[in-house]
């Protein structure tokens, strides 16, 4: 659904949101989120370029959210590092598909729903009322966001979701 980079960015931003008054150094964020420190540095740079994170050098330096968690949409974090790919034309590049075929239109519609969900979900929505990221016990290991965002949607087998009489524009022409 989202890339590993986007997940790492969300982990980092949620970590910063849980400690809004004190800057956090890269090493602490990396340890807390279980993100490789070198990769985290690149993610934090992208978030800083997007204006979502501020950094301060020096003895009491580190990273902080640039805005309150309540005003940072999840989509802004994702777009800062690896935007959701939308389908603008049929990837099959067939002459008889100048726009989206039925299959790719449905896929793009699904991406639009995901995008809208992330647009209306803030970083604060990912933090539990007690200030913790998730309800998992601390000794259960790092949060992978699946505990916060819920289980993945049930996916029907392809045979159960497409009727035999459906007309797909992507079918091979004979």
Image (cartoon, rainbow, N blue to C red):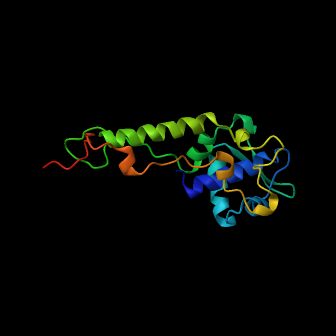
Q: Judge from the rendering whether residue 174 lies leftward or rightward of residue 52; answer left or right.
A: left
Residue occupying image coordinates x 57% and y 37% = 117
Q: Say if 56 sits above or below 103 in the image.
A: below
Q: In the picture provided, is 155 more to the left or to the right than 102? A: right
Viewer-proximal residue among 112 and 5 = 112
Inspect this view and state whether residue 55 appears.
Answer: no
**Residue 169: image location, x then y, percent:** 25, 41
Could you say which quadrant of the image residue 32 lies in?
bottom right
Residue 166: x %, y % from top left: 28, 40
Measured as percent of width and height from the top left, residue 158 is found at 38, 50
Decide if residue 98 is on the left or right side of residue 77.
Answer: left
- Outermost residue on the left side: it is 174
Q: Is residue 121 left or right of residue 158?
A: right
Rendered view: 140 above or below 135: below
Vertical placement of residue 151 versus 114, above or below: below
**Residue visible at 57% across and 49% down?**
152
Q: 66 or 95: which is nearer to us? A: 95
Nearer-the-camera pick, 29 or 102: 102
Residue 83 seen? yes
Question: Percent from the top left, x then y, of residue 67?
Answer: 73, 38
Number of marks: 0
Which residue lies at the image location 67% right of the left edge and 56% below the top edge?
Answer: 144
Name the foreground residue: 55 vs 123: 123
């Amino acid at each position: 659904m989202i890339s590993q980079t986007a997940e790492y960015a969300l982990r980092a931003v949620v970590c910063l949101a849980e400690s809004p008054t004190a800057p956090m150094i890269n090493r602490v964020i990396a340890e807390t989120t279980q993100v490789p420190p070198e990769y985290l540095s690149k993610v934090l740079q992208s978030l800083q370029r997007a204006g979502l994170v501020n950094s301060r050098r020096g003895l009491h330096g580190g990273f902080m959210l640039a805005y309150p968690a309540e005003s940072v949409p999840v989509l802004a974090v994702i777009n800062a590092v690896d935007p959701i790919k939308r389908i603008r034309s049929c990837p099959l590049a067939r002459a008889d598909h100048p726009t989206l075929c039925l299959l790719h239109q449905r896929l793009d519609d699904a991406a639009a729903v995901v995008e809208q969900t992330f647009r209306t979900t803030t970083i604060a929505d990912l933090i539990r009322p007690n200030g913790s990221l998730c309800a998992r016990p601390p000794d259960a290991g790092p949060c992978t966001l699946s505990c916060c965002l819920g289980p993945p949607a049930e996916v029907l087998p392809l045979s159960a979701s497409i009727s035999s009489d459906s007309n797909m524009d992507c079918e091979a022409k004979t």
